[in-house]
Image (cartoon, helix red, strand yellow):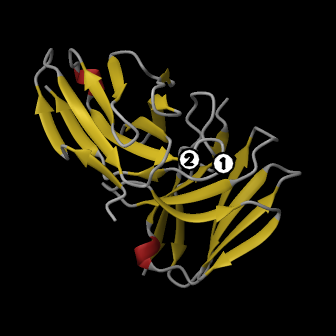
Amino acid sequence: NAGVTQTPKFQVLKTGQSMTLQCAQDMNHNSMYWYRQDPGMGLRLIYYSASEGTTDKGEVPNGYNVSRLNKREFSLRLESAAPSQTSVYFCASSEWGTNQPQHFGDGTRLSIL
Amino acid sequence: QKEVEQNSGPLSVPEGAIASLNCTYSDRGSQSFFWYRQYSGKSPELIMSIYSNGDKEDGRFTAQLNKASQYVSLLIRDSQPSDSATYLCAVPPYAGKSTFGDGTTLTVKP
Protein backbone atom coordinates (compact mmCIF):
# COMPACT_ATOMS: atom_id res chain seq x y z
CA ASN A 1 0.00 0.00 0.00
CA ALA A 2 1.79 3.12 -1.26
CA GLY A 3 -0.21 5.76 0.69
CA VAL A 4 0.72 9.20 -0.63
CA THR A 5 3.17 9.34 -3.54
CA GLN A 6 4.94 12.51 -4.62
CA THR A 7 6.98 13.09 -7.73
CA PRO A 8 9.65 14.20 -8.30
CA LYS A 9 11.67 13.72 -5.10
CA PHE A 10 14.25 16.35 -6.04
CA GLN A 11 14.27 19.19 -8.53
CA VAL A 12 16.51 22.13 -9.35
CA LEU A 13 15.03 25.00 -11.31
CA LYS A 14 16.24 28.32 -12.59
CA THR A 15 14.41 31.51 -11.64
CA GLY A 16 11.44 32.03 -13.94
CA GLN A 17 11.02 28.38 -14.92
CA SER A 18 7.77 26.59 -14.29
CA MET A 19 7.05 23.13 -13.04
CA THR A 20 4.33 20.93 -11.59
CA LEU A 21 4.64 18.79 -8.49
CA GLN A 22 2.53 15.67 -8.60
CA CYS A 23 0.75 13.94 -5.73
CA ALA A 24 -1.40 10.84 -5.69
CA GLN A 25 -3.03 8.95 -2.83
CA ASP A 26 -4.52 5.47 -2.79
CA MET A 27 -6.34 5.67 0.56
CA ASN A 28 -9.62 6.89 -0.92
CA HIS A 29 -9.37 10.12 1.07
CA ASN A 30 -11.55 13.05 0.13
CA SER A 31 -9.17 15.81 1.21
CA MET A 32 -5.68 16.66 0.03
CA TYR A 33 -3.20 19.35 1.01
CA TRP A 34 0.02 20.99 -0.08
CA TYR A 35 2.48 22.29 2.52
CA ARG A 36 5.89 23.83 2.38
CA GLN A 37 8.47 23.47 5.11
CA ASP A 38 11.49 25.72 5.31
CA PRO A 39 14.55 25.04 7.52
CA GLY A 40 13.72 25.54 11.17
CA MET A 41 10.13 26.42 10.39
CA GLY A 42 6.87 24.64 10.70
CA LEU A 43 4.55 23.36 8.03
CA ARG A 44 2.77 26.12 6.15
CA LEU A 45 -0.37 25.32 4.20
CA ILE A 46 -0.28 26.46 0.59
CA TYR A 47 -3.54 25.09 -0.84
CA TYR A 48 -5.99 22.40 0.04
CA SER A 49 -8.83 20.50 -1.55
CA ALA A 50 -11.55 19.47 0.86
CA SER A 51 -13.15 17.24 -1.74
CA GLU A 52 -12.91 16.41 -5.43
CA GLY A 53 -13.87 19.45 -7.48
CA THR A 54 -12.94 22.05 -4.87
CA THR A 55 -9.72 23.88 -4.07
CA ASP A 56 -9.04 26.65 -1.57
CA LYS A 57 -6.17 28.87 -0.55
CA GLY A 58 -4.19 28.20 2.56
CA GLU A 59 -1.86 30.54 4.40
CA VAL A 60 0.78 31.06 1.70
CA PRO A 61 -0.83 30.64 -1.76
CA ASN A 62 0.96 33.42 -3.66
CA GLY A 63 3.01 32.14 -6.57
CA TYR A 64 1.27 28.76 -6.69
CA ASN A 65 -1.70 27.16 -8.41
CA VAL A 66 -3.28 23.77 -7.85
CA SER A 67 -5.43 21.29 -9.71
CA ARG A 68 -7.50 18.51 -8.21
CA LEU A 69 -7.42 16.21 -11.18
CA ASN A 70 -9.61 13.52 -9.63
CA LYS A 71 -10.13 12.02 -6.20
CA ARG A 72 -6.64 10.50 -6.18
CA GLU A 73 -4.50 13.30 -7.62
CA PHE A 74 -3.70 16.85 -6.53
CA SER A 75 -0.97 18.80 -8.32
CA LEU A 76 0.88 21.99 -7.37
CA ARG A 77 2.20 24.31 -10.06
CA LEU A 78 4.82 27.01 -9.85
CA GLU A 79 4.26 29.25 -12.86
CA SER A 80 7.40 31.39 -12.54
CA ALA A 81 9.71 30.01 -9.90
CA ALA A 82 11.47 32.39 -7.51
CA PRO A 83 14.36 31.69 -5.10
CA SER A 84 11.96 32.32 -2.19
CA GLN A 85 10.11 29.17 -3.25
CA THR A 86 13.12 27.00 -2.46
CA SER A 87 11.70 24.61 0.09
CA VAL A 88 10.57 21.09 0.83
CA TYR A 89 7.03 20.49 -0.36
CA PHE A 90 4.79 17.92 1.26
CA CYS A 91 1.50 16.58 0.02
CA ALA A 92 -0.92 15.08 2.54
CA SER A 93 -4.36 13.52 2.51
CA SER A 94 -7.08 12.87 5.06
CA GLU A 95 -10.77 12.47 5.53
CA TRP A 96 -12.34 15.91 5.95
CA GLY A 97 -14.49 16.59 8.97
CA THR A 98 -14.05 13.20 10.57
CA ASN A 99 -11.32 14.09 13.06
CA GLN A 100 -8.89 11.83 11.28
CA PRO A 101 -5.21 12.64 10.86
CA GLN A 102 -3.37 13.64 7.72
CA HIS A 103 -0.97 11.24 6.03
CA PHE A 104 2.08 12.62 4.28
CA GLY A 105 4.06 11.80 1.20
CA ASP A 106 7.86 11.68 1.25
CA GLY A 107 8.21 15.24 -0.01
CA THR A 108 9.79 17.06 -2.94
CA ARG A 109 13.00 18.96 -2.31
CA LEU A 110 12.96 21.95 -4.64
CA SER A 111 15.85 24.35 -5.19
CA ILE A 112 15.48 27.46 -7.29
CA LEU A 113 18.65 29.17 -8.43
CA GLN B 1 -1.98 33.29 16.87
CA LYS B 2 -1.21 29.77 15.78
CA GLU B 3 -3.82 27.11 16.33
CA VAL B 4 -1.29 24.89 18.08
CA GLU B 5 1.65 26.03 20.18
CA GLN B 6 4.53 23.85 21.28
CA ASN B 7 7.52 24.28 23.55
CA SER B 8 10.17 25.55 21.19
CA GLY B 9 12.89 23.39 22.66
CA PRO B 10 15.28 21.95 21.83
CA LEU B 11 14.95 19.24 24.42
CA SER B 12 17.85 17.00 25.37
CA VAL B 13 17.55 13.95 27.61
CA PRO B 14 19.91 11.11 28.47
CA GLU B 15 19.23 7.63 27.15
CA GLY B 16 16.74 5.81 29.35
CA ALA B 17 15.12 8.98 30.69
CA ILE B 18 11.54 10.18 30.19
CA ALA B 19 11.09 12.87 27.55
CA SER B 20 8.08 15.16 28.00
CA LEU B 21 6.74 17.17 25.08
CA ASN B 22 3.95 19.70 25.53
CA CYS B 23 1.38 21.37 23.35
CA THR B 24 -1.52 23.81 23.79
CA TYR B 25 -4.29 24.52 21.30
CA SER B 26 -6.64 27.43 20.83
CA ASP B 27 -9.86 25.88 19.50
CA ARG B 28 -12.00 24.56 22.35
CA GLY B 29 -14.02 22.62 19.80
CA SER B 30 -11.11 20.40 18.76
CA GLN B 31 -12.04 16.77 19.26
CA SER B 32 -8.90 14.96 18.25
CA PHE B 33 -5.19 15.46 18.61
CA PHE B 34 -2.20 13.95 16.90
CA TRP B 35 1.49 13.57 17.48
CA TYR B 36 3.82 13.21 14.52
CA ARG B 37 7.50 12.35 14.50
CA GLN B 38 9.72 13.87 11.82
CA TYR B 39 13.27 12.65 11.37
CA SER B 40 15.69 15.06 9.76
CA GLY B 41 15.15 15.09 6.01
CA LYS B 42 12.03 12.94 6.21
CA SER B 43 8.29 13.53 6.18
CA PRO B 44 6.06 13.69 9.28
CA GLU B 45 4.93 10.28 10.49
CA LEU B 46 1.85 9.82 12.66
CA ILE B 47 2.74 8.12 15.96
CA MET B 48 -0.19 8.83 18.29
CA SER B 49 -3.82 9.92 18.11
CA ILE B 50 -5.89 10.83 21.15
CA TYR B 51 -9.57 11.70 21.23
CA SER B 52 -10.70 11.75 24.87
CA ASN B 53 -9.46 13.18 28.14
CA GLY B 54 -6.88 11.15 29.99
CA ASP B 55 -3.99 9.00 28.94
CA LYS B 56 -3.43 6.77 25.94
CA GLU B 57 -0.49 4.41 25.96
CA ASP B 58 1.23 2.74 23.00
CA GLY B 59 4.44 0.98 23.89
CA ARG B 60 6.90 3.52 25.26
CA PHE B 61 4.68 6.42 24.21
CA THR B 62 1.89 7.97 26.28
CA ALA B 63 -0.30 10.81 25.07
CA GLN B 64 -2.15 12.86 27.67
CA LEU B 65 -5.10 15.11 26.93
CA ASN B 66 -6.73 17.73 29.14
CA LYS B 67 -9.50 19.47 27.22
CA ALA B 68 -10.39 21.83 30.05
CA SER B 69 -6.85 23.21 29.98
CA GLN B 70 -6.54 22.81 26.19
CA TYR B 71 -3.34 20.92 26.74
CA VAL B 72 -1.91 17.77 25.22
CA SER B 73 1.40 16.13 25.96
CA LEU B 74 3.53 13.23 24.80
CA LEU B 75 5.70 11.23 27.16
CA ILE B 76 8.42 8.96 25.83
CA ARG B 77 9.62 6.48 28.42
CA ASP B 78 13.04 4.79 28.29
CA SER B 79 14.13 7.24 25.59
CA GLN B 80 16.45 5.83 22.94
CA PRO B 81 18.83 7.62 20.56
CA SER B 82 16.51 6.49 17.76
CA ASP B 83 13.81 8.74 19.30
CA SER B 84 15.89 11.79 18.38
CA ALA B 85 13.62 13.72 16.01
CA THR B 86 11.27 16.67 15.81
CA TYR B 87 7.83 16.01 17.28
CA LEU B 88 4.84 17.86 15.89
CA CYS B 89 1.52 18.32 17.66
CA ALA B 90 -1.56 18.74 15.43
CA VAL B 91 -5.34 19.01 15.37
CA PRO B 92 -7.54 18.16 12.36
CA PRO B 93 -7.32 20.66 9.50
CA TYR B 94 -9.97 23.35 9.01
CA ALA B 95 -10.55 26.72 7.44
CA GLY B 96 -7.39 26.81 5.37
CA LYS B 97 -5.07 26.98 8.32
CA SER B 98 -2.08 24.90 9.11
CA THR B 99 -3.02 23.09 12.29
CA PHE B 100 0.45 21.85 13.15
CA GLY B 101 2.69 23.21 15.84
CA ASP B 102 6.19 24.26 14.87
CA GLY B 103 7.62 21.20 16.57
CA THR B 104 9.95 20.38 19.42
CA THR B 105 13.32 18.88 18.56
CA LEU B 106 14.32 16.06 20.89
CA THR B 107 17.87 14.77 21.22
CA VAL B 108 18.49 11.60 23.22
CA LYS B 109 22.12 11.36 24.27
CA PRO B 110 23.69 7.89 24.68
* Residue at 52 percent of width and 58 percent of height: B36
**Is B78 rendered above or below residue A64?**
below
Q: Position of residue B53 (x, y in %)?
A: 83, 63
Which one is in front, A85 or B13?
A85
B82, B92: nearer the viewer = B92
Image mark for residue B21: none
- Residue type indicated by callout 1: Thr
- The quarter holding residue B77 reads bottom right
Residue pointed to by mark 2: A95
| Dot 2: element | loop
Out of A112 and B27, give the one closest to the viewer: B27
- Asked if badge 2 and badge 1 are on a common chain, one would say yes
Looking at the figure, which quarter contains the C terminus of chain B? bottom left
The vertical placement of A59 against A37, above or below, is: above
Q: In this view of the protein, can residue A42 be seen by the observer?
A: no
Q: Amino acid at mark 2?
A: Glu
x then y, percent, for residue A33 = 45, 37
Judge left or right: residue A94 versus residue B2: left
Query: Given the image, what chain letter belongs to the residue carrying mark 2?
Result: A
Quarter of the image that includes the N terminus of chain B: top right
Q: Is residue B35 left or right of residue A19?
A: right
Q: How many marks?
A: 2
Residue B33 seen in the figure: yes
* Mark drawn on residue A98: 1
Give the chain of mark 1: A
Q: Is residue A70 left or right of residue B15?
A: left
Question: Does the residue at mark 2 contact the one at mark 1 (Cβ under 8 Å)?
Answer: yes
Residue at (59%, 83%) from the top-left corner?
B59
SS for dot 1: loop
Could you say where residue B17 lies in the image, as x and y percent from the top left? 59, 81
